[in-house]
Image: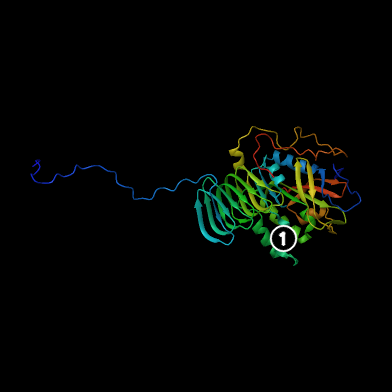
Amino acid sequence: MTPSVVVPKTHATTHPAGPARMDGLSHHSLALKHALRRFRALGGSRVLDLGPAIGRNVQFLSAFISKLFIADLYATLRSQTGRSALDRAKLDRILQRDLPPTQQSPIDLILVWDLLNYLDREQVAILGRHLARLCRRDSLVLALLSTQQTIPELPGQYLMLDPETLRCENDSQRERRSPGYKEPDLEKMMPAFEVETSYLLRNGIQEYVLTTRSVA
Amino acid sequence: MWKKKENEPPTPEPTFKPEAPTARPAAPPPRRGDRATIGPTLKIRGEISGEEELVIQGQIDGKILVKGQGVTVGKSGKVTADIHARTIRVEGKVRGDLFGEQEVIIETSGDVEGNLIAPSVRLENGSRFKGSIDMERAKQQQPRPLTPGPGPANPDSTKPAEPGDNQANKPSPPGPGQPNLRS
């Protein structure tokens, strides 16, 4: 799929040639807009946010959802592993414990934000399997991937300012290498999902909306 | 048989006196401003129930039921318990579900893992929360007229963003009858 190139709306200077970071910037997010429109059209009501709890987002989502799960996954992974490597079994245990139980109703929309940039391929695959178990047919996933060489050291916090505007806040002082995942990587690592649409922002962030792959 | 005997001292007329109450009088209802504090060195295991404001600066493992009043988990408070109260304010650490009849507030220093069930939930910037927020109850308790959702009025109005077109400075406030979940 050829992504449409979108110039982000910002209220600060963008860094067109700099690292893929959007801290302090708000941008027009066609992916968020698309995901929310599809979510509403499908009659969705349950949202899983893998990022940290943000009061603004809780307020925003409260207008049209019935249940919000907040996983704050990166903070958990960091606190559980420290500097030691996050092995497969440990990640499995954490995801089993910290994601909503599968016996409950399925999740309609999963907000992954930029978390995938901070996981290796195997970790993304494990996360993808756990997320797939929570989904129903047509569930949606919003993910932001960097296409640049470097990314902030830590994931950002994304604030939903309105149905089509996101603001990223990131306190990272340092940067790290970006894994540079692309659409084929995503679909390979997370085979239960397929890319429904994507938008490339001028600062090198590619926004994806994924949906659960329909079984032929 | 009904005539009094002579020389017999008259018996006093029986008088009816209500029996003196033996039970202790009921405790006066809590006055506005009354509150109990569990100090920072106290550790309690078990169930705490009552009808007055409760401030927890210590450690509690168990269950907390405070009818019609507020519970505050202070900055040094560590609670591993479900809390039921009118309002629940968390400045410390809680592992458990919070059932607020009116409101649950997680302050900047608050750290909660559990589920929040209340008509109004407030997460302050910097607070830590992991778990679920039941928003259905909020909607049921605060009925509101149908308002447009987050989607655009015209769903086909998608257009690429343009430089300088900055909507981000104008976050849309919640609608008039929108549930009171705020930051």
Dot 1: within a 10 Å radius of its alpha carbon, few (fewer than 14), some, or many (20 or more) residues?
A: some
Residue farthest toward the bottom in the current orientation of the protein? A84
Label 1: element kind: helix
- Identify which residue is drawn at 64% across, 50% down: B132
Q: Is residue B132 left or right of residue A34?
A: left
> How many marks are shown on the rendered structure?
1
- Is residue B38 placed above or below A61 in the rendered structure? below
Q: Is residue A177 left or right of residue B65?
A: right
Q: Is residue B85 left or right of residue B9?
A: right
How far across and how far down the image is residue A111, in percent? 73, 49
Is residue A101 visible from the viewing direction of this image?
no
Is residue A128 visible from the viewing direction of this image?
yes
Q: Nearer the viewer, residue A25 or A199?
A: A25
- Identify which residue is drawn at 31% across, 47% down: B20
Q: Nearer the viewer, residue B34 or B8?
A: B8
For residue B151, which quarter of the picture? top right
How far across and how far down the image is residue B126, in percent? 71, 52
Write down the chain letter for disc 1: A
- Identify which residue is drawn at 73% across, 61% down: A78
Residue farthest toward the right in the current orientation of the protein? A17
Q: Nearer the viewer, residue A70 or B37?
A: B37
How far across and how far down the image is residue A193, in percent? 74, 51
Residue at the spot of label 1: A77
Mark 1: which amino acid? Leu
How far across and how far down the image is residue A216, in percent? 72, 48
- Identify which residue is drawn at 70% across, 36% down: B149
